[in-house]
Amino acid sequence: MPNIELLAVARGDKPADCVLRNGRVVNILSGDIEEADIAFYGEQIAGVGAGYAGKEEVDLQGAYVAPGLIDAHVHIESSLCLPAQFAAAVVPGGVTTVAADPHEIANVAGAAGVRFMAEASRNLPLQVVLMAPSAVPATHMETSGATLSAVELADLLKDGTVHGLAELMNFPGTVQGDPEVLAKIAAFSGRPRDGHAPALSGKHLNAYAAAGAGSDHECATVAEAAEKLARGFYVLIREATNAHNLRALLPLVNERNSRRFCFCTDDRMPGDLLDQGSVDYILREAISFGVDPMTAFRMATLNSAEWFGLHDRGAIAPGRRADLIVFDDLRAPSARQVYAGGRLRAEHGRLLKDESPALAAVPPAVSSSVNVAWDSFNLHIPVDGSHVRVIGSLENQVLTEELILEARIEDGQAVADPARDILKIAVVERHTASGALGLGFIQGFGLRHGAIAGTVAHDHHNLVVIGADDESMTTAAQAVARMGGGLAIADGQETLAELALPVAGLMSDRPLVQVRNRYDSLLDAAHEFGSTIRDPFMAMSFMALEVIPKLKLTDQGLVDVEAFSLVNLFVEE
């Protein structure tokens, strides 16, 4: 039932809690810039127009006002921080809602991890709309720390923990009609069901759409995005730390199709969040590319609200949430003030002091998550041929190539060859100490010596190590385990930099700035070792993700993603 007091304020019979005066409203519903006042009652907008009186009145002096921005797909865990610290990073830029997929922590701690993220997201200046992780585990070719069935996901929906179904990463299983995948889709009938189908095309794409997937954030080319758009998908244009798709896809956007595009960050590291921003950065980049500001704002607000069925936000209109950003330049919007739920939450790039979130207590269910069988830890690769399959890392992409290269052989072992930028990669099962260990080679990281390691390894989040020699790899791996999860870089027996991530091996319990500083130390060391990748740790985290083509490595071995099967490391010549 509509709130009687809200209606009284809307009619002008009672004073508003707050009135923003003399603003230029970016009305994405009409497409006009409207000079109007905005009246709040509680968390809602009561009225837009002239003649409202308020208990508090703020003169915007002709500044622009737009709806709060919405990130259509993000993994908060990738910020390496808890939700409160993530909010402290994105709200000052104008992001007031995120559709968050907690499948990173779910792959470590299951439903307990999802519920932890929900609890840690309460009472923040940021609205966190959780989606149910559909891929725990992502496939049968990995070892995760948990399994989430269709029944368990339905329970999360029933108790209000989640809003919809997160990215259907097992697109082969979806297309082929895997009963468990279809059961998960059916459990979310009538709810938004996000897709994840890199390079899927033709009849298989038709089957994926027919199964119920309604969006996709994995498009890398205009042709791919155009086909998915034509088959009914919302295309979520991604600009992450390691996957830069924005400028490749923006040429497709026009006035006929722009209502089917949204913006998302997917995975964004602390430095990028603090230095560039979140969806606010994407918005500015889109406008600078040549997208009309009104269109760009719709892609950053209303389109996402409509895809997720969040009809209480996404526009400045009576009855909607009073989530607003105030800024001065329509062609380079940078938030001066941010209102969320009718309250001023941030100003001049910082949360207000009384909005600064407290760090959440971390329960045992999401800690103590690193369990490695060190007695079976062996990085030796006995020779079984002259050539090996090598993962070819691609700059600014999570896609990889499959390379067939001559192996470097020493004392009957295949070893790393830094001179040819061929490094060894290992994925070590860390949830149950099973001893499972996948070994392979990778090109494109550029390390001349030393090794990097971490427990951030999408999506199973086992312990992944890349290095130029076995000793450095062992040192880095042991440093990560000793911290209870995290990231490290080592050279020989010396650990040079590290970042502890004790929350499920994915997140720190420290403030974002501290996390960023330690992370920068890791990057500096990696670049000193010769890495040519802007963020080798983020890139490494995707080298174990066996649902994105072409060649990846899990604790079970090398995966040919397109064939959806394990393959041998050595190739017969």
Image: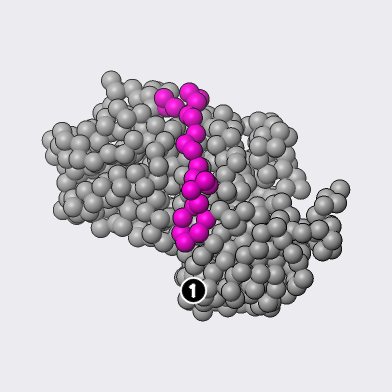
> Is 21 situated above or below 153?
below
**Residue 393 appears in which quarter of the rendering?**
bottom left
> Is 302 situated above or below 180?
below
Q: Position of residue 463 (x, y in %)?
A: 36, 35
Residue at 67% x, 34% y is 156
Residue 362 counted in the magenta span: yes
Q: Which residue is mark 1?
A: 332
Residue at 84% x, 57% y is 8
Tag 1, which secondary structure? loop
Furthest residue in direction left, as rendered: 411
Number of numbered discs visible in the structure rendering? 1
Q: Position of residue 213 (x, y in %)?
A: 66, 52
Asked whether residue 305 is in view, the answer is no
- Looking at the image, residue 544 sits to the left or right of residue 32; the answer is left
Q: Position of residue 86 (x, y in %)?
A: 48, 47
- Looking at the image, residue 464 sits to the left or right of residue 45; the answer is left
Residue at 62% x, 61% y is 324
| Most foreground residue, 460 or 420 | 460
Q: Position of residue 457 (x, y in %)?
A: 40, 41
Asked whether residue 23 is in view, the answer is yes
> Is 223 situated above or below 102?
below
Which range is magenta? Answer: 346-369
- Looking at the image, residue 59 sits to the left or right of residue 350; the answer is right
Residue at 50% x, 59% y is 347
What amino acid type is highlighted by mark number 1? Ala
- Looking at the image, residue 431 sits to the left or right of residue 75; the answer is left
